[in-house]
Amino acid sequence: MSTIIDSGRVAEHNDKLRGGLEEDYAALAGMLSRRGVDIEQLTAKAQKFAVALPSWGAGTGGTRFARFPGRGEPRNVFEKLDDCGVIHQLTRATPGVSLHFPWDKVSDTQALRQQAEAHGLYFDAVNSNTFQDQVGQEHTYKYGSMTAISAATRAQAVAHNVECIELGNALGSKALTVWVGDGANFPGQHNLRGALERYLESAREIYAALPADWNLLIEHKLFEPAFYATTIADWGTSFACAQSLGEKAKCLVDLGHHAPNTNIEMIVARLTQFGKLGGFHFNDSKYGDDDLDSGSINPFQLFLVFNELADAAEREGAAFNPAYMLDQSHNVTDPIESLMSSAVEVQRAFVQANLVDRDALRGFQESHDALQSAQTLKHAYRTDVSAILAMARLRNGGAIDPVACYRASGYRDQVAEARPAKAGASSSGIV
Ligand code: PSV
Ligand code: MN
Ligand code: MN
C-alpha cells in the first residue's frame, strides 16, 4: 500500500507518544481485567472496525446561505481519494469510500480502482443524485424524480440509478444508496398515496438492475427540501418499500434524518429484528439534518445505537453486517480532521458497546432492576477507551494521534499549493 504521508514521519510521531500510550493501555487493561474484560479482545475488535468515508465530505460543505471554501480542496475524484487515503493511513479505520454520482465524475473506472487499491481503499455503497438538475439534463426534477408525474422524468431518474449501479459494479461496490428529496411543499400539492405508488414503480425498475450480490439501500429523511410531506420520510415507509421490493432492498438510517428526540436506537432494533437494516450514515445533529461531526453533540445516542448493534451481532453472528458510512458536512473545520475524528468517535461507540456486560444487563432486565440496567450501560459508556483506539491504530500501522500527526505532516499546505482555489469551487463539483 502506498502511503501519502511519509511513513517515517508517522513512525517519528508514534515514537514520541508510544511510552505514554503503553502506560495508559496497561492501566486500562488492569481496570478492565478487574471487571472480567480482556482488553486484547476489545483491541482486536477495534482493529477490525471500519466506517466508510463520503467522497463529498472531503471538500468543505456549506449551508444554503453560503459556502466558505477551505484551502487545498480536492478538485476531482482522484484528489478526493488522496485525501481519503490520508484519513485511512492515519486512522486505519476508514478503508471504504462512498462515491456520489454525478458529483464524482468517473470516466476511467480502471484507473480509479487502481488508485483506490494503491491507497488501501475500496468502494463502498455508491449514491445516486436525482435531487438536483445537472447541466444539459433533459427533464427537470423540480416536481420530483422517482415520484414525478411525468413518465419521462421518472424514466430519466431510473436510468441514472441504473448507470450508478453499472459504474459501481465496475468499481467493486456492492450497494446503491438512494435518497430522493421528492415530496410536496403544500397540502394537496400531490396525492400522498399516488406519489409513493410511483416511487415503488420506479424503485422496482432500479431493483431489477441490481447484480445478484448487491443491496439497494433506501435512505429516509423527515423533511427538506420538501417541507410539507416527503415521500420517504420515515423508517416505516422505508421498511414497507424494502419489504415490497424484495430481499436485496434494505433501510439506511442517517442519524440526522429524524425529528429531534426520536428514539433512533429503537428504530435500529426494529430494523434488525426484521432483517432490514442495511446501513448507516453517521453524523450528529442538534436541530435537523445538520450533518455535524459524529459524536460531537450527542455521543450517548451514538453509543446506544451501537449497543443495539452489539445486541444484534450477538444474536445473529457474522451474518449481521450493515454498511457503516459517514455523511457529514464540514463548514468550519478541515474536512480531513473532521473525518478522522468522526471515524474515531464512531469506533469509540463501537468499542464501548462491546464493553457492555450483556449477561448482567439481561439479569437486571429480568429482575426488573431498571436502575442497575441503566447503570450497566452507563458503566460501559463512561469508560474511556481512548487507549484501546490508539493501540488499535498503532498496531494497524496508523498514528497514535491522527490529527496531531496530520497537522505536523504539512499535508494541507502541500495540497493548497498543488490545488489552487477556483472561484466558486464546491465540494460537489456543482456550482
Ligand atoms: C440527504 O440529506 C443526504 O443525507 C443523502 O445521503 C444525500 O445523498 C447526502 O445527504 C448528500 O448530501
Ligand atoms: Mn445521508
Ligand atoms: Mn442528510
Image (tube, rainbow, N blue to C red):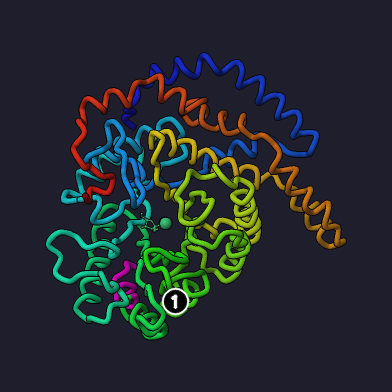
Left or right of 320? Residue 217 is left
User: Residue 354: x, y in percent?
Assistant: 65, 46
Residue 308, visible in the rendered structure: yes
Picture layout, residue 361 above or below residue 21: below
Left or right of 164? Residue 244 is right
Read off the residue under disc 1.
241
In the foreground, 298 or 313: 298
User: Residue 46: x, y in percent?
Assistant: 56, 39
Picture layout, residue 66 above or below residue 23: below
Question: Is residue 213 rendered magenta in the image?
Answer: yes
Question: Is residue 403 rendered magenta in the image?
Answer: no
Picture layout, residue 139 above or below residue 295: below
User: Which quadrant holds the N terminus?
Assistant: top left
Q: Residues within 10 Å of mark 1 (few under 14, many from 20)?
A: many
Tell me the element at label 1.
Answer: helix
Mark 1, ligand 1, within 8 Å: the answer is no
Q: Which residues are magenta?
A: 203-214
Residue 316, visible in the rendered structure: no
Name which quarter of the figure residue 203 lies in. Answer: bottom left
| Amino acid at pointer 1 | Cys
User: Residue 119: x, y in percent?
Assistant: 32, 36
Residue drawn 54% across the image and 40% down it: 345
User: Residue 425: x, y in percent?
Assistant: 22, 42
Residue drawn 40% across the image and 42% down it: 330
Left or right of 288? Residue 348 is right
In the foreground, 331 or 281: 331
Residue drawn 56% across the image and 29% down it: 390
Q: How many marks?
A: 1
Left or right of 135? Residue 263 is right
In the image as oriented, which residue stretches furthest toward the left? Answer: 136
Residue drawn 39% across the image and 41% down it: 331
